[in-house]
Image (tube, rainbow, N blue to C red):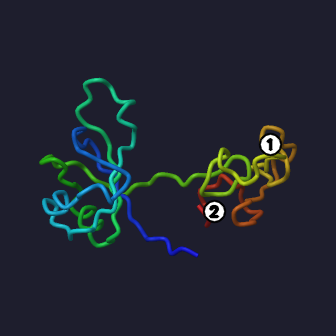
Amino acid sequence: AVVKLKTFTLLVKFAPTHYRVTDDSAFTDHSEAELINSIPTGSILKTQWVKRPERRSPHQQSAHLLVTFIDADAANVILQRGSMVICSKSCPAEKDLSEPLRCLRCQKYGHMPKTCQRQHGVSTCGRCGEGHDIKECENPDKRCCVSCASDEHSSNDRACPSF
């Protein structure tokens, strides 16, 4: 068993594209960003661009950045301020509201069909929870959420407690 570190991700908008990011915190020193934003050293776990740099426009000067914190207090400081300084530029910051991944093969959260344990066989319907594709569903009024086993809503309902 592995204990997963609790993290807090913020979306920082319009950060200068020359800011150096990496997904591996072991190779990135975030101390300058932490210092200038008056948050404790070691608060930032990682930073990554929302869109890969190779997909940017040729002369794009700013882009959206995901900043992952291991310290809730540090993330809250940035949220309360409403901005984070990146490369001497004050950039709007807000809580990352990205939707969790949901597999369209088994309807469970946390992975996509490409990495689904159920590689072969019948898909699970996102509407009724039975063994067929949602396009072939013959029970349009039946609801069954695969994630929480409720018959009150379907698997793609944002009101699901598993969401």
Relative vertical location of residue 72 with respect to residue 122 in this rendering, above or below:
below
Sort mark 2 into few (<14), some (14-19) or many (20+) by Cα contacts within 10 Å.
Answer: some
Give the numbered dot on residue 160: 2
Helix, strand or loop at mark 1: loop
**Residue 76: percent from the left, percent from the top?**
29, 67
Looking at the picture, which amino acid does disc 2 mark? Cys
**Location of residue 78 by image quarter:** bottom left
Look at 60% across and 60% down and name the residue there.
Answer: 159
**Location of residue 56 by image quarter:** top left
Relative vertical location of residue 163 with respect to residue 73 in this rendering, above or below:
above
Give the numbered dot on residue 33: none
Residue furthest to the top in view is 58
**Residue 67: percent from the left, percent from the top?**
33, 55
User: CB under 8 Å between callouts 1 and 2?
Assistant: no
Looking at the picture, which amino acid does disc 1 mark? Asp
The tag earlier along the polypeptide, 1 or 2, is 1
Look at 80% across and 42% down and name the residue there.
Answer: 133
Please state, as top left, top right, bottom left or bottom right, where the N terminus lies in the image.
bottom right
**Residue 140: percent from the left, percent from the top?**
81, 46
Check disc 1 and report the residue beneath it.
133
Choose between 57 and 125: the one closer to the eye.
57
Please state, as top left, top right, bottom left or bottom right, where the C terminus lies in the image.
bottom right
